[in-house]
Amino acid sequence: MKKMLRYLLLTVLAVCFTIPCLGAAEAATVALLPLVNHVEGDEIANQVYYKQAINAIKAQPGFVLVESDKLTLAVENSNYASTGIDQAVLEKIAKEGDVDVVFALELNKLATKPMNRTGERVIKLDMDGRAFAYNRLNGVFYNHNVRSDKQIDEALTARWDWAHEEFGRAVRQEISRALRAK
């Protein structure tokens, strides 16, 4: 009798553990468009953009980054880098590429300039751009300015590329905001 009760209990537990798996929802697909970089001679920004954006999308639960031939063709046909990014372009890419979320970033300015103050040297960041996203699931268009005018002591920036570090932080922040937009 004890064995029968154990088998019955194990069967009920197995059924209870598998029920949540049956109703699992699919992850939303995300398309990451190439960076529209208007900063002359700055190729590092493209690398920072891809690295930080991919990591930010992976960190968000319920979203998966996709890449397919259909999506690549839709991006090439849109010619968004020369015509400009707007809601209609992102809707078209999402529909033709069969993705749920499309994210794009335009970088217009990324530079640092020293500022002499009495007794200290400070570096000021000058970053300007725009982040765009379109969520096909709920029809939300996200459009946000990416700006920064932070200042930091020059001695603290001697060992790393502070401007691109701040740009990477801004990319992560915009991806997070765009994926949460409702």
Image (spheres, grey):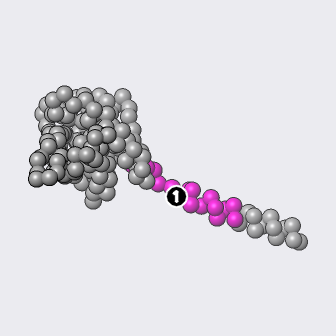
Residue 60 position within the rendered picture, expressed as x and y whole percent measured from the top left:
40, 52
Q: Secondary structure at mark 1?
A: loop
Structural crowding at the residue carrying mark 1, measured as other residues with C-alpha within 10 Å and reported as few (<14), some (14–19) or many (≥20): few
Quadrant occupied by the C terminus: bottom left
* Residue 141 in view (yes/no): no
* Residue 36 in view (yes/no): yes
Left or right: residue 116 versus residue 89 is left
Query: At 22% from the left edge and 46% from the top edge, which residue is drawn?
Result: 154
Query: At 22% from the left edge and 51% from the top edge, which residue is drawn?
Result: 152
Quadrant occupied by the N terminus: bottom right
User: In this picture, is 89 found above or below 24?
Assistant: above
Determine the image quadrant of residue 76. Answer: top left
- In the image, 172 versus 27, the foreground residue is 172
- Which residues lie in the magenta part? 13-28
Q: Is residue 62 magenta?
A: no
Q: Is residue 14 magenta?
A: yes
Residue 88 position within the rendered picture, expressed as x and y whole percent measured from the top left:
17, 43
Query: At 42% from the left edge and 50% from the top edge, which residue is drawn?
Result: 59
Type of the residue with mark 1:
Gly
Determine the image quadrant of residue 159. Answer: top left
Residue 117 position within the rendered picture, expressed as x and y whole percent measured from the top left:
11, 51
Report the magenta stretch's main SS. helix
Mark 1 = which residue? 23
